[in-house]
Structures are given as structure tokens and as C-alpha cells.
Image: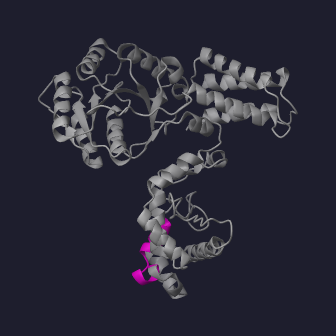
Amino acid sequence: MFESLSERLDSAFKQLKGEGRITEINVAATIKEIRRALVDADVNYKIAKEFTDKVKEKALGDKVLTSVSPGQLMVKIVKDELAELMGGEAAELELNGRPTVILIAGLQGSGKTTFSGKLANYLNSKKHKKPLLVAADIYRPAAINQLQVLGEQVKVPVYADPENKDAVSIAKAAIAKAKQDGNQVVIIDTAGRLAIDEAMMTEVANIKEAVQPSEILFVVDSMTGQDAVNTAKAFNDRLNFTGVVLTKLDGDTRGGAALTIKYTVDKPIKFVSMGEKLDTLDVFYPERMAQRILGMGDIISLVEKAQDQFDEEQAKKIEKKIRANKFDFDDFKTQLMQIKKMGSIKDLLAMIPGVGKAIKDIDISDDAFKGIEAMIDSMTPAERANPDIITPARRNRIAKGAGKDVSEMNAFMKQFDQMRQMMKQMNKFKGMPGMGGLNPFGGGKGGGMPPMPPGGMPNLFGK
């Protein structure tokens, strides 16, 4: 995400390396590089200049503490200004209608229908609302079927009337149906076009007038850069939408749309979407995004993803087994499944400060755990529940069953044993003064992160 921009900004900050203090002379080169980086990221030159002027003013106006280097101070100033440029604070959905009506608008191919499914899943699973999806795209042949498939996957009903060619009446009938069935949120997926045209704008404006939505979300493909910003302005002039959704952030995104859309239309980015999986929708936090752009990681989002997959009852059982030194391969596989559900391994690692830059050129497969899973699946139930009974002969049989070399099996067993020894040591710490009952492996208040695999993340580099 924004790798090119991150690299260019990092290079700009190196201009101040070794400097004792910030001066007009040494800051000029850094500011120039930052401006170039933003323009190359498809940020409008006027916005880039205004941004760097603010950064320069703050940098020269601040007194550098002796414990903070000029480079560190510049990073902090740029981080704060990037966050402010993208909106400053996260913007919540307004879910105050009965039902709440959310109108989805945007160009064809921007990801509106997929986002509609993701939003329904988000509202259902995280906000505990009962949504209804509405197929109001009467032009694209596959739109209704696509929405129905998505609805089935997220277990959310879909209102569709394929014979009706009036999008306004479809939307009104869907709201009546939602009131009848007790749906709390109605998500209306409208038609898009390959370009802005009067017919499309008139239709979506008529739907807005007829249903009076609480939220109008403009979905924009973040890979289109300044074109996305210009399109957003045209839609906003007509619809006065309430928020923006950036899709395809996992693609070759330069960053221009994310950085400047709030500045241009003065409407907050409410969600960011990555990939086709229906649980890959995140609330947009400007400060967290600024941190990620600058290579600072995003630990808060990482912990939140872990907590989303946290099963309190399961964690309590595992915690008891850890305390009794009985953590086995079944427990370990359960933890692997939780980590996999959190999303792309490379994206997760990039949220750890300093790791993103280190792995940017490394291809990390999301199948990294398959080898370990195969070895665990090749064990008998007794072996999974009692790791200590696995003899050299059993290791040979397990390795063959998993299609692995016995040396890989031996290395895995060694790492697993090391992890159990670490857990045993942590049990001793739990009884020490000042530990406060801390359980780093899950359980307790708020759960926590699942145990990481022995020896760190296995086979990440395809070896």
C-alpha cells in the first residue's frame, strides 16, 4: 500500500540525517523532495505545495528538543499534516433512521456491488444490525446475481425485482419491505457508468430524492488517482454525498486519491476496502494511514484484527491448558486458523513498525502455514493431543504423510517444543509481583493476540 510514496518520503527524510538542527537551508532540500514525492503520487501540485508550505512553517517554528533529531521531528510533522490532510479523525456511519437508508454511488468498475456486500457483512457482524441489500442496478446484466451471491455469502437478504426497470420504485419498495421485515439498515446498490453522464446522475439523484438516505457513500477506485478526485467532485456537486469509500487499496495505488479527496470535496473517507474477501473492509483512520505511509506500522489495527477473531471461550480453554503445560497440536492449529482469518500475512506483518520496509520486496505467500497444517493433519488424534509420544519412527511416518522431508518435521517439533518451554516460563512470571495476571497468549480481559507460530512465522518466503 503506497509503497512508492513511502520510499520517496523516506528518502526525503534522509536529507536531514546527521544534521544537528533544522535550518532554512537544510530543510529546503527535504521539503522539495517531499513535494516531488506527493506530485509523483498523483497529488495535485497546488495541494502538494500548500502541504509542504505548512510542513516547512511548522518545522522552522518548532524548537528541536535535544533528545529529538531533526529527521525525527520532520517525520512527526509530516505524519500530523498527512493525517490532517486526510481528515484528522475517523468518521462514523450515521445509523439513526428507521430504517437507516444508505445509498451507494460511483462509476462502473469502482467496486460498488462488492462494497455493498462488505458493508452488509460489517453491519451484521460488527454493528449487530439487520441489513437488507437492494439491487437497484437495472442496467448491468450480472449486477442482481452478483448482489444475490454476496448476500448469500454474508447471510443478508437481498431485495430484487428483475422485471422492474424503474430504479426509484425498486428502492421505495425495498424500504417498505425492510419496514415490514424489521430490517434496521437498507443498502441500495445503484447503477454505475463508464463515465459521468446526465442520465446516470439524474437517476441516482431521483433515488436520493425519493428515499431521503441518511448516508450517501461515494465509492471510488483508489488506483485512478486524480481522476477519482475529479469524479468525486462532480458527484458531490450533484448529490452532496456524506462520505467516501476507497476500494482496491491492495493494488498499485500511488496515493493521490486517499491523500487529497477529503481536501477537494470536504467529505470524510469512511471506509477502505482491499481484496475480494468480504471481511476486508476497514474503517478509515487518517492517523493510522499516515503512520503506515511513513513506515511506522499500525499496531492498533493489528490488535483490533486479532480481537475480531478472538473467541473468548476457546481462549479460556487454551489459557487453562497453557497454565497446565498441556498446550498441544490441536490448540496450535486452532491458533493458526485465527491468524489466517486476520487477513494477508504480508499486510499483517507490515502493520508492525519497521517490518514493512524490510519485507516490501519479498513475496510472502498466504499459504505459509500449509506445510505446518499438513504435518499436524498427518498426525493421529493421540499424537496431536500428546506431542511427547511422537518418536523418531512416528516423525518419519508423519513427514511422509504430509509430503515433507523428515528434517522439516524435526525442525517443526524443535520449534514447537521451544514455544512450549517459553509458555512454561511465562507461567512462572504470572505468579510474580507486578505481572498483574498478564496472559500474553489470549484469555483474560479483552483476549489478546493468539500465540504466534514457533520460531516466528513459518515458511514465509516460500522456502
Magenta region includes residue 140: no
**Residue at image location 79% in from the left, 23% down from the top:** 60
Q: Position of residue 25 (x, y in %)?
A: 84, 21
Quadrant position of the N terminus in the picture: top right
Q: Nearer the viewer, residue 456 or 433?
A: 433
Task: Determine if residue 5 is in view.
Answer: yes
Task: Count how many numbered circles sit on residues in the image.
Answer: 0
Segment tinted magenta in the rendering: 371-384
Magenta region includes residue 372: yes
Q: Position of residue 381 (x, y in %)?
A: 40, 80
Quarter holding residue 456: bottom right
In-image side of 5 versus 173 (left or right)? right
Q: Is residue 40 above or below residue 320?
A: above
**Residue at image location 64% in from the left, 35% down from the top:** 6
Quarter holding residue 8: top right
**Residue at image location 44% in from the left, 56% down from the top:** 309
